[in-house]
Image: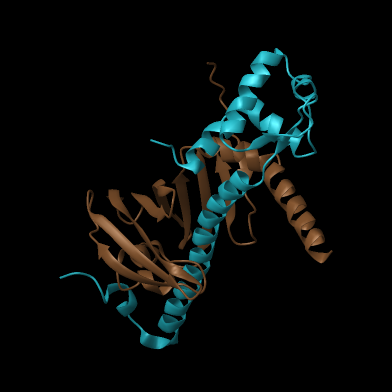
Chain colours: A cyan, B brown
């Protein structure tokens, strides 16, 4: 069974070396040699990380056959960003609405409804 | 594999009213409401009140199921003019009125299966006001943390957006 795209993106991102590689590629395409230079790692080790990123669709190889630069692909990152922002939007805006609702209830009480109607009205039993 | 004790709070774009940050695998929302705790608790637990506030602006919510007890199921259907209805659903894991509850918060994403995970909501009394700390335990969010923290995603997306705009202009 094919893992869902978001899961393979998360799995690929769940490694600091791979995130650093992506951060580097966000600046522009780079060769495997360029990508390995900041790390205390062999090129085969870096290549392994690159394969994971490639499988997740986060990077691709450029056309230059000799140099074979890697470059970043936007789509999976956009999915992750969308996913987080969905959560963010949901709770942030729900809280705004909750705040407005609670103010409304309290304003009603201060205007002399006088008791705990709003709190107890729906108590079961 | 070495374990590092990193309590890495990373701000996720807090607003003047709401603190939003991630910490490890958690995404946390914190806001203080000018209302007593019982009232805030009730807004979460009363099916007639949930539709008054639940969901982003412009959405309406129908409470389809709400069995508030450990093991009980919940299901809210959210409607908006610009999209298909989305069902949010899950199970209550722990109910401790009016202080905290845990539930699973799930939703189906077409083509991606069911997403989401457990959430913990804590209601703290702060001099008669109520501070809610809502934590989404996202499991994989270390990945998101690193990615978003580096500014990479936003930077890259904005760059590409601008590029797309530029290309569209030509």
List the single residue furthest toward the bottom. A112
Q: Is residue A100 left or right of residue B70?
A: right
The residue lying toward the viewer, choosing from A88 and B157, is B157
Q: Is residue A62 visible?
A: yes
Task: Depth check: give the residue in front, B71 or B99.
Answer: B71
Question: Which residue is at 33% across, 77% downward?
Answer: A118
Observer able to see residue B101? no
Q: Residue at x 67, y 42 (%)?
A: A73
Circle count: 0
Tell me what residue is drawn at x 73 percent, y 18 percent: A39
Residue B55: x and y in percent read 45, 66
Q: Which of the image's four quarters has the C terminus of chain B?
A: bottom right
Q: Is residue A29 left or right of residue B138?
A: right
Residue A87 position, x and y percent, is: 51, 54
Residue drawn 25% across the image and 74% down it: A122
Residue A59: which quarter of the image?
top right
In this picture, residue A25 sits left or right of residue A8? right
Q: Position of residue A47 (x, y in %)?
A: 66, 20
Question: Could you say which is closer to the camera, residue B33 or residue A35?
Answer: A35
Q: Which residue lies furthest to the left in this view?
A: A125
Q: In this view, does B134 lie above or below B151?
A: below
Residue A104 point in image, percent of width and height: 46, 79
Against A37, is B134 above or below?
A: below
Above or below for B62 versus B149: below
Horizontally, residue B117 falls left or right of residue B30, namely left
């Amino acid at each position: 069974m094919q893992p869902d795209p978001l899961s393979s993106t998360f799995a690929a991102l769940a490694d600091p070396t791979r995130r650093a590689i992506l951060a580097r590629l966000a600046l522009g395409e780079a060769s495997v040699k360029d990508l390995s230079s900041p790390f205390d790692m062999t090129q085969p080790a870096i290549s392994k990380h690159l394969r994971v990123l490639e499988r997740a669709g986060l990077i691709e190889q450029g056309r230059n056959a000799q140099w074979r630069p890697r470059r970043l692909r936007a789509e999976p990152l956009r999915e992750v960003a969308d996913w987080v922002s969905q959560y963010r939007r949901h709770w942030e805006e729900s809280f705004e609405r909750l705040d407005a609702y609670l103010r409304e209830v309290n304003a009603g009480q201060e205007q002399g409804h006088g008791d705990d109607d709003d709190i107890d009205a729906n108590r079961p039993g | 594999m070495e374990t590092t004790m990193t309590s890495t709070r990373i701000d996720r774009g807090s607003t003047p009213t709401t603190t939003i940050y991630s910490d490890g695998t958690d995404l946390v929302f914190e806001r203080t409401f000018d209302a007593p705790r019982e009232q805030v608790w009730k807004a979460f637990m009363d099916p007639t009140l949930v539709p008054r506030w639940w969901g982003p602006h412009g959405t309406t919510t129908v409470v389809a199921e709400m069995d508030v007890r450990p093991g009980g199921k919940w299901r809210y259907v959210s409607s908006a003019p610009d999209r298909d209805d989305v069902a949010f659903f899950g199970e209550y894991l722990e109910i401790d009125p009016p202080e905290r509850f845990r539930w699973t918060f799930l939703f189906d994403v077409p083509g991606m299966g069911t997403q989401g995970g457990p959430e913990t909501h804590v209601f703290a009394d702060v001099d008669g006001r109520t501070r809610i700390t809502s934590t989404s335990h996202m499991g994989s969010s270390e990945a998101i943390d690193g990615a978003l923290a580096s500014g990479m995603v936003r930077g890259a997306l904005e760059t590409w957006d601008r590029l797309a705009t530029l290309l569209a202009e030509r």
